[in-house]
């Protein structure tokens, strides 16, 4: 169904220059999905130009994935396009310096993501291929291949497997269809050991220090039987939030940046969502994003927001809103 929608739209538009857009500091799910999707598009559009763009670079793990894929280059900008696809990117704020360029473009916009899209993105998009119950965007791209009965070549299968492993936290957050998809990817030629090795990198000392600083600066709130933790760091907000969860918090908010460029990462335990029904992306970060003059969104247990403002004040807003939701 999803694949046929995309194919039919492409046949209708007949693009000549297609750009696949990943979010800033693109992670392996975004990069792996974009790679496999670009290979699929090259079959549907054999005469069209295809490029993958990630503003403001890619993550260290994504660099390892890119090195594992032949003849694959990721650019940080694009000159022109008559067809745009946002991959694993649910808000324009995630496009960094390219946000205004994409918003102002007259090119049709397709969104392929497992996050609920920001209302601005939904309004701008020509086609939404979104499943927020999927563990990763890679799982959606895999479904597109299946829907179109297209054979996955070895490296596309590897790219998607790495994406699934990364975003599902090695299948901790997987559904049954995720595991079936992973098995099919391995059957298609993806090397499971290689996929794991791409994601196995000793934690950088700066990331370890950021995690320790987050623990050092933590503020703890108790609401009933739930433990909420907040902290602030200069970088690695998502990693620091995961560390606070590992230390015992049920929900963690970690802010980074400064007044002119504020970032907030939110993480929660799976049982917090299942017992409260509070979705970090839809119920908290979308609202917080607007409150800090930016945008936010994400999954039920992993979300974030970007905007402007004082980090400590933003964290207080996060806690206040969560307590209101719990009440």
Image (cartoon, rainbow, N blue to C red):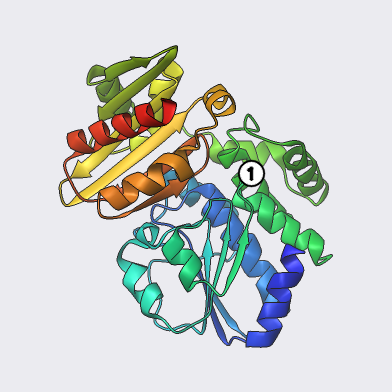
Question: Where's residue 243, x and y in %?
Answer: 40, 24
Relative to residue 5, is residue 121 drawn left or right? left
297 relative to 45, above or below: above
Q: Position of residue 93 (x, y in %)?
A: 35, 59
Q: Quadrant of residue 247?
A: top left
Q: How many marks?
A: 1
The residue labelled by disc 1 is 164
Q: Quadrant of residue 155?
A: bottom right
- Is residue 36 visible in the rendered image? The answer is yes
Residue situated in front as seen by the camera: 218 or 39: 218
Q: Quadrant of the N terminus?
A: bottom right
**Residue at 57% across / 40% down in the picture?**
166
Question: Can residue 47 be spotted in the picture?
Answer: no
Q: Residues within 10 Å of mark 1 (few under 14, many from 20)?
A: many
Query: Residue placed at 47% from the left, 72% from the top?
Result: 124
Image coordinates of residue 28 in percent, x first then y, are 53, 48
């Amino acid at each position: 169904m999803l694949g046929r929608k995309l194919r039919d739209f492409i046949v209708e538009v007949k693009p000549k220059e297609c750009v696949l857009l990943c979010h800033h500091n693109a992670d392996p799910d975004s990069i792996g999905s974009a790679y496999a999707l670009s290979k699929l598009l090259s079959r549907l559009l054999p005469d069209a130009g295809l490029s993958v763009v990630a503003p403001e670079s890619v993550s260290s793990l994504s660099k390892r994935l890119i090195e594992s894929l032949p003849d694959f280059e990721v650019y940080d900008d694009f000159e022109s396009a008559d067809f745009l696809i946002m991959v694993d990117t649910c808000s324009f704020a995630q496009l960094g310096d390219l946000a205004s360029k994409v918003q102002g473009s007259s090119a049709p916009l397709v969104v392929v993501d497992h996050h609920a899209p920001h209302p601005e993105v939904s309004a701008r998009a020509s086609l939404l291929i979104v499943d927020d119950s999927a563990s990763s965007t890679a799982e959606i791209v895999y479904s597109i291949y299946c829907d179109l009965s297209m054979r996955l070549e070895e490296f596309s299968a590897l790219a998607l497997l790495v994406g699934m492993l990364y975003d599902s936290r090695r299948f901790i957050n997987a559904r049954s269809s995720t595991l079936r998809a992973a098995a099919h990817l391995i059957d298609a030629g993806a090397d499971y050991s290689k996929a794991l090795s791409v994601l196995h990198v000793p934690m950088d000392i700066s990331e370890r220090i950021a995690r320790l600083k987050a623990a050092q600066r933590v503020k703890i709130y108790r609401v009933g039987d739930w433990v909420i933790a907040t902290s602030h760091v200069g970088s690695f907000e998502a990693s620091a939030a995961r560390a606070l969860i590992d230390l015992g918090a049920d929900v963690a908010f970690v802010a980074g940046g400064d007044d002119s460029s504020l970032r907030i990462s939110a993480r929660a335990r799976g049982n917090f969502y299942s017992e409260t029904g509070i979705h970090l992306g839809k119920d908290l970060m979308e609202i917080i994003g607007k409150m800090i003059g930016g945008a936010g969104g994400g999954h039920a247990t992993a979300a974030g927001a970007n905007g402007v403002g004082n980090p400590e004040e933003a964290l207080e807003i996060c806690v206040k809103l969560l307590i209101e939701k719990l009440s």
